[in-house]
Image (cartoon, rainbow, N blue to C red):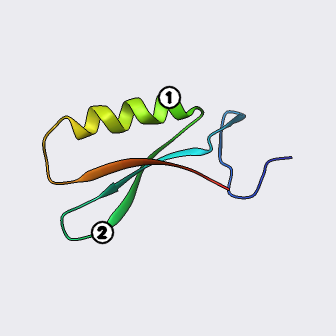
Amino acid sequence: MLGRGAMTDGGAVLPWLVIRQDDNGNRYRVGRYATQDEAQKTADDLDRHGHEQLYWVERLG
């Protein structure tokens, strides 16, 4: 059984979120990932674009 808030993609548990905060303080989920490393790589890649948005990784639960 999956934990509360878990999401699956073809049976995979995706507990790691990438969150974006724009310059107005609005927050959005960018994606969900199986591993922290995968989520962090995505956040780092997005952060390199030099926009005013802030990206970070959170774990559900």
Relative to residue 5, is residue 33 depicted above or below? above
Residue 9: image x %, image y %?
A: 63, 37
Q: How would you rate the neighbour count of disc 2 (Cα within 10 Å): few for under 14, some for 14-19, many for 20 or more? A: few
Residue 19: image x %, image y %?
A: 40, 53
Residue 13: image x %, image y %?
A: 68, 38
Residue under the image location 39 percent in, 29 percent down: 41
Mark 1–mark 2 distance (CA, rounded to whole Å): 25 Å
Q: Determine whether label 1 and label 2 are within 8 Å by CB.
A: no
Relative to residue 43, is residue 29 depicted above or below? below
Badge nearest the viewer, 1 or 2: 1
- Residue 53: image quadrant is bottom left
Residue under the image location 80 percent in, 48 percent down: 2
Residue 17: image x %, image y %?
A: 50, 47
Upstream in sequence: badge 1 or badge 2: 2
- For badge 1, the amino acid type reads Asp
- For badge 2, the amino acid type reads Asn
- Residue 25: image quadrant is bottom left
- In the picture of the structure, the residue carrying the numbered disc 2 is 26
Q: How would you rate the neighbour count of disc 1 (Cα within 10 Å): few for under 14, some for 14-19, many for 20 or more? A: few
Element class at badge 1: helix
Q: Is residue 22 left or right of residue 9?
A: left
The numbered mark at residue 60 is none
Residue under the image location 18 percent in, 64 percent down: 23
The numbered mark at residue 37 is 1
